[in-house]
Image: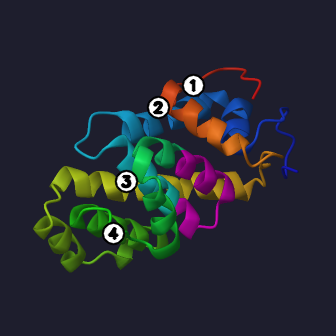
Amino acid sequence: MPYINLENSLPGIRSLVQYRPETGRHLYALVRVLLTGDSTLSKGERELIAAFVSSGNGCTFCTESHASAARILFQNQSSVVDEVLEKGSSEKLNPKMNALLQIAGKVQVSGKEVRPEDIDKAKSCGATDLEIHDAVLISAVFCLFNRYVDGLGTSLPEDSAAFEEMGHRMISNEYKFLPNPTT
């Protein structure tokens, strides 16, 4: 049960953005740019970073919803998502993505954990400055979202299968702010 009266029964961040739409629409706009906007990182890779950071923060809602979206986007290689959530990397991913995940994991702990050698490694694996920037920003933003969701004690769906539905919805809606959703 949420720590404050959110005046709706939606799970996770969806309850918060509906409670305070003045800020919610801006949060959705930011995540829309980061996870679905133009990028040389695939949507699946960006969802994977979000799920990985959320897992490190222990945020069940964000981990499960973004892992679901990543699994859908990775299609026949969806096992990569579970491997990354368990080990922090995957041999099925290219070295660049594993290096970006390493940076994301350090940002999740503290931005000051990232060292020049982490950036150099990512660059030597082919990461561009923009990809490094976006991996760090996705990580930082999801730390904010995780703390927002868990700091107000938002609810989880009663049925864990709802996360798969959320994954499909996030992909198809591309994080458009939808006032007054029912689910």
Magenta-tinted stretch? 53-68
Residue 29 marker: 2
Residue 172, compared with residue 47, is above or below; it is: above
Residue 16 % position (x, y): 70, 39
What residue type is disc 4 on?
Ile
Let me know if residue 172 is in the magenta part.
no
| 1 sits to left or right of 10 | right
| 1 sits to left or right of 26 | right
> Along the polypeptide, which appears first: circle 2 or circle 1?
2
Q: Secondary structure at mark 4?
A: helix
Residue 141 % position (x, y): 47, 52
Q: Read off the residue under disc 4.
A: 103
> Along the polypeptide, which appears first: circle 4 or circle 2?
2
Task: Identify the residue shown where x is 38% and y is 65%.
Answer: 104
Question: Of residues 15 and 54, which is closer to you in this image?
Answer: 54
Q: Residue furthest top?
A: 179
Q: Please report contact status of discs 4 and 2: CB closer than 8 Å, yes or no.
A: no
| Label 1 crowd (10 A; few <14 / some 14-19 / many >=20) | some
> Along the polypeptide, which appears first: circle 4 or circle 3?
4
Q: Read off the residue under disc 3.
A: 137
| Label 2 crowd (10 A; few <14 / some 14-19 / many >=20) | some
Q: Gap in Å between the C-alphas at discs 1 and 3?
A: 20 Å
Question: Of residues 36 and 64, which is closer to you in this image?
Answer: 64
